[in-house]
Amino acid sequence: MLRKKFGIIGEQLYWHANGIDYSDLHNIGEPETKGFSHSITLLRDYLGDECKTVIIELAEEVCRRAREAGLAAKTVHLYVGYSRVEPRRAISRTHSLTYYTNLTMNVYRVCLYIFDTYYKGGPVRQIGISLSNVAPDDVLQLDLFQDNEKQRNLG
């Protein structure tokens, strides 16, 4: 009766109302990874060079996760949140590379560039790094002057 009234959806409604679902669950793929990120709220206010230590640790974490997933990123985002006592707004900047990377030092250099360009002093309480615009890491471009394979193995 439901099929006559509502078509094919009527039959599906009948089966679902009775707790029966014939959906094929075996062909559901993994969700597509769009990027990697990691951030930390610091226990106290950090200044200048102390922030750079945290940045390299965060860069290592996001790059390690990207390498484990077999992916490399082209876009790096750095977030620096100031302490409540600081009237400045947070720094949130993105930098796109001309190549894909999942090497810690490449990401760290980009983050340092952003940090040195936009950080004008003041106590920092939160730092975050994210990688986006990802692709399989087998598309890494070779560099004539650097041994990227050695750097990947080291990572």
Image (cartoon, helix red, strand yellow):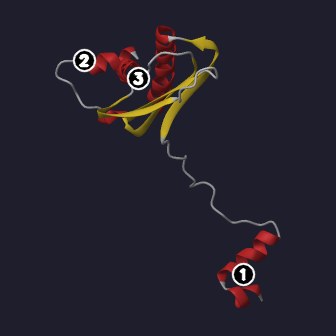
Going by the numbered disc 1, the residue's amino acid type is Gly
Q: In this view, does 99 lie to the left or right of 67?
A: left
Residue 106 occupies which quadrant of the picture? top left
Q: Tell me which residue sits at (83%, 70%) in the image.
A: 18
Q: Earlier in the sequence, mark 3 or mark 1?
A: 1
Q: Residue 10 carries which label?
A: 1
Q: Do the residues labelled 2 and 1 touch (CB within 8 Å)?
A: no
Give the quadrant of the N terminus. bottom right
Q: Mark 3 points at which residue?
A: 111
Q: What element carries label 3?
A: helix
Residue 39 is at least partly visible in this image: yes
Going by the numbered disc 2, the residue's amino acid type is Asp
Q: Which of 1 and 116 is in front in this view?
A: 116
Q: Earlier in the sequence, mark 3 or mark 2?
A: 3
Q: Residue 129 location, x and y as percent?
A: 49, 27
Q: Residue 4 location, x and y as percent?
A: 71, 91
Q: Which mark is residue 23?
A: none
Going by the numbered disc 3, the residue's amino acid type is Cys
**Number of numbered discs on residues:** 3
